[in-house]
Image: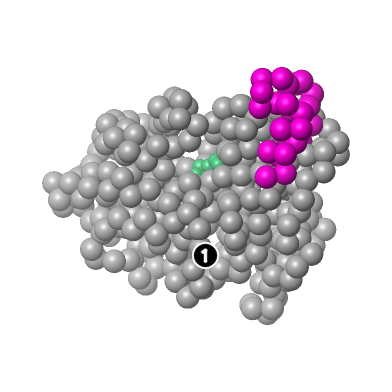
Amino acid sequence: MSDSIRILGLESSCDDTAAAVVEGIGCESKILSSVVVGQQDLHSAYGGVVPEIAARAHVEKLDICCKRALEQANSTLDCLDAIAVTAGPGLIGGLLAGVMFAKGLAAGTGIPLLAINHLAGHALTARMTHGLDFPYLSLLVSGGHCQFLIVASATEFIRLGSTIDDAPGEAFDKSARLLDLGQPGGPAIEAAARKGDPLRFEFPRPLINRNGCNMSFSGLKTSLARKVDRLGIGSGFAFEQDIADICAGFQRAVADILAAKSSCAIAEFRDRIGNYPSSFAVSGGVAANFEVRNSLESRCDAMGIEFIAPPLEFCTDNAAMVAWAGIEAMLSDSPGDAVVTARPRWPLDEKSPPISGFGKKGPKA
Ligand code: KG4
Ligand code: ZN
């Protein structure tokens, strides 16, 4: 193998079909292309992701995305060292669509195939975008997940805590639905919150004064639902300012919980590793939220810890992170399972006790 590794990444675990070509030169990354085709318009009439519709759309779009990613990267299949596909966790139909497509491509070309954990893709993104050294602290905060992890190596993740109910992205999406703001809810609430007063309405901050790094977000959505009822918003009677103030208060509560629990995770990292983390990296769709980014950054600044937030396009689902996780796997001692199968539930840290509940992307990992 030459000094550089070029990988085609494929992602189809939820409602984004994505393909990307990434090159790894030692530990340096070069993102040659990143194509993402969303499915918002297909699901908007139903108020959420419909798994069957998502799976069919992935089947239709995977080859188009793949062709586009290779063209944009000025690359052909024979330039590739491997194909990396998200094999889990996620919605089974979408995962099967991606895995079957990748298997066909690999069988037809003889290119090696790697099964990638979607959460590892998010957690390793900071190494692709900022070249972080191991170990570092990661907060993975998306539509289906919310967990603090020690990223000890490309294949070793220690979960310090997680949400015990909804993921923050899920809470944003459900709340936006109650406010009739459209999907995905996170960007819609962030936009509405810009003109809002975050102090007008009170929102709970569950578990904030408890020890440990576990979090809870479902009470925020319930609290928002009560305000929506009280103000008559659900019956079509709504003042723009009321909605803006509710969104601002809700968003502030999410950011406060994540920031407070980040301090607990930093302390826990020190207890387990023996020193404070030099870097704290956030990833996942909710990491695109500026209030969340700012409050985490202030917390890290106060503690002298470098804060890393990837560019927005690599926070939300994409295939560059999948390709990069493939490069990391090839550079590591354990490049993964020889048999690639779709795994709707696939915890990153197999040693931590399972988290109960069923999220937007299937059972929580
Ligand atoms: O990582 P991602 O693209 O997919 C999952 O792995 O879940 O995250 C999608 C989630 C959605 O719930 C979406 O509402 C949320 O990320 N999100 C945001 C923002 N952009 C996307 N939440 C808050 N603020 C944003 N700007
Ligand atoms: Zn994701």
Position of 171 with respect to 64 (left or right) is right
Pinpoint residue 350: horizontal percent, then vertical percent: 44, 71
Position of 157 with respect to 203 (left or right) is left
- The quarter of the picture where residue 196 lies is top right
In magenta stretch: residue 237? yes
In magenta stretch: residue 12? no
Task: State how the image is colored.
Answer: one colour
Height in image: 332 above or below 319? below
Residue drawn 86% across and 39% down? 199
User: Is residue 97 shown to the viewer in this render?
Assistant: yes
Pinpoint residue 361: horizontal percent, then vertical percent: 44, 48
Residue type indicated by callout 1: Ile
Figure quadrant of the N terminus: bottom left
Pinpoint residue 32: horizontal percent, then vertical percent: 41, 39
Residue drawn 23% across and 44% down? 101
- The residue range painted magenta reads 222-248
Residue drawn 58% across and 65% down? 149
Position of 123 with respect to 68 (left or right) is right
